[in-house]
Amino acid sequence: MWRDTPPASGASQTIGEAYFRGTVQHDGASSFDGKRAVVTSGHVVVDQPEAIMVGLDGKRIGEVTSFGFENDSAHFDCLRVTPTDHGAVVSVIDSDSGDVLRLVELGADGAAVQTIVHPAAHGAGCPLVVSSPTAVVVALPRADGSFQVVELSAGQVHELPAPSAPTGTPRWIRKTTEGGLLWLEGTEARTLRMLHVSTAGTTRVLAADLGSAIALSGEAGRLFLIRAFTSGTQPIDELACELL
């Protein structure tokens, strides 16, 4: 439950109140431009998830965002906030409705830019959600270990080609200019490798071993790798992808 009346200037600013106990799920992220943050929280069974956007002045932007659950006592999982250039995407797997992905993209004004409801495989795991300048791309795991990749734009869902035999966990995905897919995954050897999937579904390896690193999305769909500590430093490299 989020407070609707903003406090007086200079007063203590309580922008939200949420149910909390050991099994609560919550997440948050700042937009890539650094001007807004989105926080979401909910408790399985007791309190369905909601989200708010907060500005640099500490005040709420827009209204409280909900996901359209049918019941207040909703069963859900995988509550996530994914930053965009000027807002964020909030996503959750709704188990009450037969395992569906509920996703809301919030713009700079805190209002919903698009709202998506899409089927998800039961018990297959949490999806990877990545924003790009023109769309949101989601990799949904299937029970057999494969993935369905979809592009979400203007409230519409378009399926993209997926790797024919992924061997690791997806860390970053991006639609290419020709309609294919770039797929960065973490391998069992704890390194990263980059795949390219053509529109026909043909998968080829672009980089077999990018080393051990953390992959981070950036503004305008950029990709950065944070390398392991070396001599007391932690280099951050931007990965250039010609196929973008």
Image (cartoon, rainbow, N blue to C red):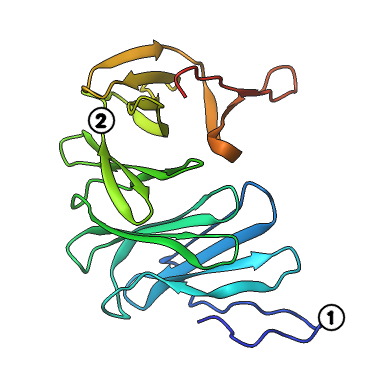
Residue 131 visible here: yes
197 on left or right of 5:
left
Residue 189 visible here: no
Q: Residues within 10 Å of mark 2 (few under 14, many from 20)?
A: many
At x 74% / y 63%, what residue is drawn? 56
Residue type for callout 2: Pro
* Rendering quarter of residue 46: bottom left
Q: Which numbered dot is residue 220?
A: none
Vertical placement of 102 versus 206: above or below? below
Vertical placement of 69 versus 86: above or below? below
Vertical placement of 76 versus 156: above or below? below
239 on left or right of 46:
right
Q: Position of residue 207 (x, y in %)?
A: 43, 12
Residue type for callout 1: Gly
Q: Position of residue 176 (x, y in %)?
A: 40, 27
Label 2 element class: loop
Q: Which numbered dot is residue 10?
A: 1
- Between the residue at mark 2 and the residue at mark 1, the CA separation in whole angstroms equals 52 Å
Q: Which residue has dot 2 on it?
A: 161
Q: Position of residue 97 (x, y in %)?
A: 20, 67
